[in-house]
Image: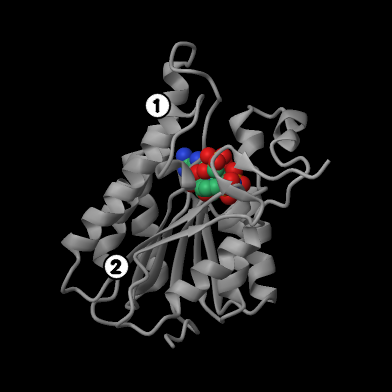
């Protein structure tokens, strides 16, 4: 088993959902956290909670993965926090879907935000973080993909394309980093109740709730535990790809709902 105690873990999109839950799960292992997202007020609370849950350190700073300069400034700040230490885990989690419109109806701004965060965000953050990642010492880059990257559904052309892009990036990185000892993997969840649908439906909480009616979705904690499990495998083990679905979901659009 790879010990996460006192290892630096950098999580993007740590202000809610999977990222916030991952902060607590890695904290429970005694890790040191670097947390980024746009909502700093949320990060402050999550960092405080992480310290009380066992984090050896919990540093946070505003991060917008859609802006190259912002990502680079963030990594300079992170480098100063690490001092002479290396980063052991990078979790590229920031992202989400924007709207559920058909291609005929969708807006450029929704497409652009979807690609800026889910695709270009991973590229930017990984490029900036790579010099800080430990070589031959059990480091991991874990990208959050989706069942949507492996299947398609109406209203999600851009999101499905973006998550297919995430899968392609993960696979390309696996080739590029072969021989460095840095592990690379994707965690692809099915339906999980986080703020994902609230964001997709632009704050319409009722519409967001309806997505999960009558079924038991995944929780953010389920994915956080999966991330800890992957990062704590022995350094010679790379979990390349993992698809995690609720028992009530056989595929996209194939969901068992209780009356
Ligand atoms: P949430 O909406 O709860 O969390 C999304 C996180 O991403 C927030 O912390 C948000 O922080 C952050 N984020 C969004 N845009 C940016 C940005 N430009 N820069 C930095 N951070 C950003 O949803 P989830 O936890 O569900 O989503 C996390 C990931 O999981 C996403 O990549 C999503 O696509 C994926 N996913 C979700 C599934 C689900 O059913 N919930 C299933 C499969 C995959 P802030 O707004 O503060 O910047
Ligand atoms: C989120 C899961 O099925 O809503 O990636 O696209 S889904």
Residue sitting at 47 percent across and 48 percent down?
146
Q: Is residue 39 visible?
A: no
Q: Residue at x 74, y 34 (%)?
A: 210
Query: Ligand 1 appears in which quadrant?
Result: top right
| Image height of 112 relative to 116, above or below | above
Q: Quadrant of residue 183?
A: bottom left
Considering the numbered disc 1 on the image, is that residue within a helix, a strand or a loop? helix
**Can you say whether 79 is above or below 246 in the image?**
below
Q: What is the tally of numbered marks visible in this picture?
A: 2
Q: Which mark is residue 132?
A: 2
Q: Is residue 217 visible?
A: yes
The CB of the residue at mark 2 lies under 8 Å from ligand 1: no
Q: Nearer the viewer, residue 216 or 11?
A: 216
Instruction: Name the spot of residue 168 as percent of width and height, x first.
Output: 28, 48
Determine crowd level at label 1: few under 14, some 14-19, many 20+ residues with C-alpha closer than 10 A: few
The quarter of the rendered structure image containing the N terminus is bottom left
Give SS at disc 2: helix
Q: Position of residue 88 (x, y in %)?
A: 37, 74
The residue labelled by disc 1 is: 112
Q: Residue furthest right?
A: 259
The residues tagged by marks 2 and 1 sit, at their Cα atoms, a distance apart of 29 Å
Q: Quadrant of residue 133?
A: bottom left
- What is the x, y in percent for residue 107? 46, 16
Quarter of image, res 130: bottom left
Question: Which one is in front, 10 or 122?
Answer: 122
Assign the C terminus to one quadrant of the image: top right
| 216 shown above or below 206 | below
Horizontal relation, residue 208 to residue 47: left or right: right
């Amino acid at each position: 088993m790879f010990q996460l105690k006192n290892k630096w873990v950098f999580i993007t999109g740590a202000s809610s959902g999977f990222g916030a839950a991952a902060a607590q799960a890695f904290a429970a292992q005694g890790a040191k956290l670097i947390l980024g997202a746009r909502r700093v007020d949320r990060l402050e609370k999550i960092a405080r909670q992480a310290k009380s849950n066992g984090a050896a350190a919990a540093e946070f700073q505003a991060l917008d993965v859609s802006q190259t300069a912002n990502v680079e400034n963030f990594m300079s700040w992170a480098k100063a926090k690490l001092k002479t230490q290396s980063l052991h885990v990078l979790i590229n989690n920031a992202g989400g879907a924007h709207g559920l419109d058909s291609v005929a109806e969708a807006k450029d701004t929704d497409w652009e935000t979807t690609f800026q965060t889910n695709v270009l965000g991973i590229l930017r953050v990984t490029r900036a973080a790579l010099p800080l990642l430990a070589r031959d010492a059990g480091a991991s880059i874990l990208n959050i993909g989706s069942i949507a990257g492996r299947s398609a559904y109406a209203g999600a052309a851009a999101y499905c394309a973006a998550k297919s892009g995430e899968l392609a990036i993960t696979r390309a990185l696996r080739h590029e980093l072969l021989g460095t000892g840095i592990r690379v993997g994707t965690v692809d969840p099915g339906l999980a109740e986080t703020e994902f649908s609230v964001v997709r439906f632009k704050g319409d909480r009722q519409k967001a709730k309806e997505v999960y009616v009558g079924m038991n979705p995944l929780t953010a904690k389920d994915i956080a535990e999966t991330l800890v499990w992957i990062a704590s495998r022995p350094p010679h083990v790379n979990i390349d790809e993992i698809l995690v679905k609720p028992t009530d979901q056989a595929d996209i659009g194939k969901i068992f709902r209780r009356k």
